[in-house]
Amino acid sequence: MSGAEGRVADQADLLASLPSSPEEVSGAEAGSAGSPEGELGAQDGRPLDHTNAESQVTDPIPSRDNSDVENLEDPENLSLSDENLSDGGHRTNVFQAKFLPNSADSVVATCGRDGQVRIAELASMPHYKITRCVAQHRGAAHKLALEPDSPYRFLSAGEDGMVFAIDLRLHQPASPLVVVRDRESKVGLYSIFVNPADVNQFAVAGKDQFVRIYDQRKINSISNNGVLKKICPPHLLGNDKMSVTCVVYSHDGTELLATYNDDDIYLFNSSDEEGAQYVKRYKGHRNNATVKGVNFYGPRSEFIMSGSDCGHIFFWEKSSCEIVQLLEADSEGPVNCLDPHPYLPVLASSGLDHEVKVWAPTGAGPSDLRGLKTVIKKNKLERDHDNVSQNSMLDSHMLWFLMNQLSQRGHRYPWQTVGLGGMDEEPEDSSSTSDSSDDDEGIPDAAQGMAS
């Protein structure tokens, strides 16, 4: 493998031997990998289909009363008919599934597009599998943040901006922890992660350009909306259309990794002060069509991995930012979820197709990166094309607005001179302007594509 064997030989050999044709299993057999994430917008009209473990559904357990939380005691919220429920209890797509630590792989927490956070108890007795709702968001819930070594406590985040602290030992497990805001507006959340070095701290990210870090012991809505500090690449500070689709801590909590919608992946030192520059930047993939995850790989977080709109999985060496592996993972579209095994050199991936793929080293030979430049070039061209199209649409809309305002005030445009017949002449290129606007309608708009 080019560029990696001399630096981290053991992990580089692992990456070089990953197969190009992984084993495929159903979602029920690989629940820890999570389900494909929801679409950002209407760019791709294909429905998302997911498979969960067979289970018996019970009534949801209500969350604690809060003005920002939906009251689950409302009968309308409890009327879950069998026709609308998946086998795992969710009404629609499951976005993530996680085995709780130290539970003998018998307790699974899930969250989904319906905003529910559910617990599935996988008992050893046949046909005795039960799920229950422990929290309800008012928008889609994309991610859960497990507390290391705890089989009872974890966090959830949703597009309603709410973070729940969940303790399964309580009769009412969910407690509203914080509502993430930017000034007075709620910030919808796509991702949450607990710092493995300090379980009181957690990072959230979503529908703006900031990664926010909180300390559960110091949350005070009066002081900076409870935020301990905010992180953002300096050149993206003024970009209100940017979103962060996933944020994760490294194995020891010293680093933070954030992937930005239709931009790049950035590595930060978690100990840096607010406003500090990012440490590394990873390029080549594309994160536009769906809510994509990003993750570290290796026992010491030596590598960075991410899915892409092009259906590939990218691996970068963390220290050099060099792409050291490229895997073709999904022929149907984007790769959304990547989860490494906690201690084996195995990872699971999923996208918009119907399989969860499990990858393991085979020792078949070195990596073949001959198509890498073509894939990177295509991703860049598509991103540049969309950016130009969006700017053209904005310029056209602004010109139309100004012309409309001037006409309402009785102003005459320079080209509206009186002709020989006394009629105002129209510009010759007015029809071509209309044609270009029609062509732009079919181009995916990343700025509008953030609703799941």
Image (spheres, helix red, strand yellow):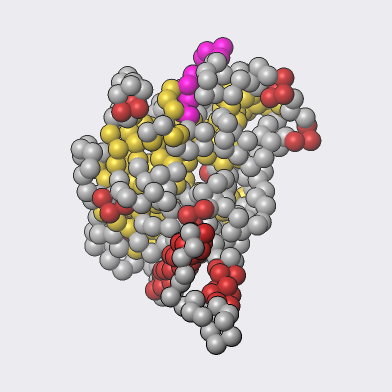
- Image quadrant occupied by the N terminus: bottom left
**Measured along the vertical axis of the image, is residue 443 above or below residue 8?**
below
**Measured along the vertical axis of the image, is residue 150 above or below residue 268?**
above
Of the pair 153 and 348, the residue shown nearer to us = 153
Q: Is residue 244 left or right of residue 89?
A: left
Q: Is residue 73 left or right of residue 233?
A: right
Q: Residue at x 57, y 37 (%)?
A: 140
Of the pair 34 and 287, the residue shown nearer to us = 287
Q: Residue at x 43, y 58 (%)?
A: 262
The percent coordinates of residue 343 (x first, y second) are 40, 41
The image quarter containing residue 326 is bottom left
Q: How many marks?
A: 0
Q: Considering the whole magenta stretch, tell me its main secondary structure.
A: strand
Span colored in magenta: 162-176
Of the pair 213 and 194, the residue shown nearer to us = 213
The furthest residue to the top: 171
The percent coordinates of residue 385 (x first, y second) are 46, 70
Q: Residue at x 36, y 57 (%)?
A: 264
**Measured along the vertical axis of the image, is residue 377 above or below residue 194?**
below
The percent coordinates of residue 205 (x first, y second) are 40, 40
Q: Is residue 331 highlighted in magenta?
A: no
The furthest residue to the bottom: 420
- Image quadrant occupied by the C terminus: top right
Whether residue 28 appears in this view of the structure is no
Q: Residue at x 54, y 74 (%)?
A: 433
Q: Is residue 175 highlighted in magenta?
A: yes
Whether residue 79 appears in this view of the structure is yes
**Measured along the vertical axis of the image, is residue 237 above or below residue 188?**
below
The percent coordinates of residue 256 (x first, y second) are 31, 42
